[in-house]
Image: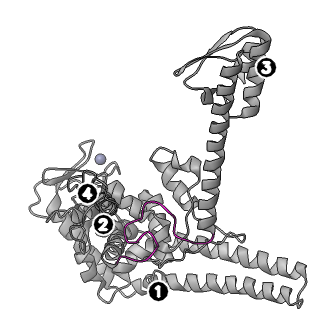
Amino acid sequence: MRMVADYEAGLLDAIICYDLDRLTRQPRELEDWIDRAKQRGLLLVTANGDTDLSTDGERMYARIKAAVARGEVERKGAQSRAQRQRAEQGRPPKGVRPVGYRIDGSVIPAEAEVVKGIYAAFLRGDSLNSIARALSGVKGGDVAAGLSQFPLHSRTLVIERNERRAAEGKEPRPVPPEGVWVASTVLSILRNPRYAGYSVYTKKKDRKLPPGESQRKAIKDNIVRDENNEPVLGQWEALIEPDQWWNVQNLLDDPSRVTNRSGATVRKHLGAGLFRCGECGKPVITRARYYSCKDGDMNRTRDAIDEYVRAVVIERLKRKDLNRRKKQIDPDAKDAYSQRIAEQRARIARAERDYDAEIIEGTDLARIRDAARAEIQRLEAERLASGTGVVLGHILGVEKPAEAFLEAPLAMQRTLIDTLMTVMLKKAKQGKKGFDPDSVEIAWKS
Ligand SMILES: [Zn+2]
């Protein structure tokens, strides 16, 4: 401690601090300061007044303060230990209830439907902003389908608290006005592991992190895991299939995979930033009715190009050879991963039982367990890597993919185009009337 060193070196004879317990929360350290004060004199100036540690009365006061401060530290430690234990037992956490659950962990059906609708919209390719707009009751424009106006959770919580206060004969707190949903509110629902049934414990230091990437990443780390590193399941009903929840995390973690995820830049046009200039290869920008090259290489009428590109995609979707791909990204394939992972878990459990029954040796158990865990890890990685399939599965995995494509939200159409092909816009030939298909070059991605 720098301060101790400075004092020992005779550099200071008074210490100014906000309160005594800022000097030290450790009674033992306080005793050291008292000894120093006795030996050489020390004036402590705090917001509550001066403390002269060389007098008995003041020393007593300082000791009481330090003991109280120490007790507080211990109590907080005990509280977080109790919370951690609750989480390890999969019991619903105390405190603020999330959308969809009562504080005891039981499901609130109307709210649960909204949570499910938010996940479904996001997996369909809707942006956080378009989901927020739908929940705010906005009609028309870029609004996620299947969701309607819903009160903000923060407001609902105040109203519920007021009901409890009224029951206790207390004055109600002011209820905030009806607000609008924002992308970050939607994000916090999409990020909450409780919806997949996972028990969560937030370490105290994580709670203090500023909002942003570090915090978002930390949420997955907050899933409580057992001694086998398997997530602890909470004693509440999951609203979202774990596979789907992980796919959402995957998409959120990698916005480059899917355009228009964050909703930060709403793309209103099919090819904005996606189609490329045929001369220099840079992504095109939109200007009025045109797709243009930033460097001025070309300027093309947007509607005609969009129409042509959509027609090409539809032709492509009608081809049989997409069946192979369809199979790869069949949404049902997701369940196959879960099942194979469950099989490996069962293998571990069986080996443990056999070991308990003295049918196999400890070395056999270790070998089986290591192999099964490695396989689980591999399967989980594979499942994550196939994440794009979920979005595209909604188009390619259906009976009539061409119709599904035309009905899909713009963001999803863009995703599919980006997966299938690169669109290059060449300069229109001088003197050529109408739309010339040769001026749009399509390179298929394998
Ligand atoms: Zn260019």
**Above or below for 376 versus 200:** below
- Residue located beneath label 1 in the image: 332
Mark 4–mark 2 Cα distance, whole angstroms, equals: 11 Å
* Closer to the camera in the image, 309 or 41: 41
Position of 166 compared to 222: left or right?
A: left
Name the spot of residue 443 as percent of width and height, x first. 37, 66
Residue at left offset 39%, top offset 73%: 391
Within 8 Å of ligand 1, the CB of disc 2? no
Q: Amino acid at mark 1?
A: Asp
Q: Earlier in the sequence, mark 1 or mark 3?
A: 3
State which mark lies toward you, 1 or 4: 1
Q: How many C-alpha atoms fall within 10 Å of the one at disc 3: few (<14), some, or many (≥20)?
A: some
Q: Are marks 2 and 3 in contact (CB under 8 Å)?
A: no
* Residue that badge 4 annotates: 267
Q: Amino acid at mark 4?
A: Arg
Question: From which residue to which does the magenta span run?
Answer: 89-108
Instruction: Say which label, 1 or 4, has the lower sequence index.
Output: 4
Gap between marks 1 and 2 measured at Cα: 21 Å
Q: Tell us which disc is closer to us: 2 or 3.
A: 3
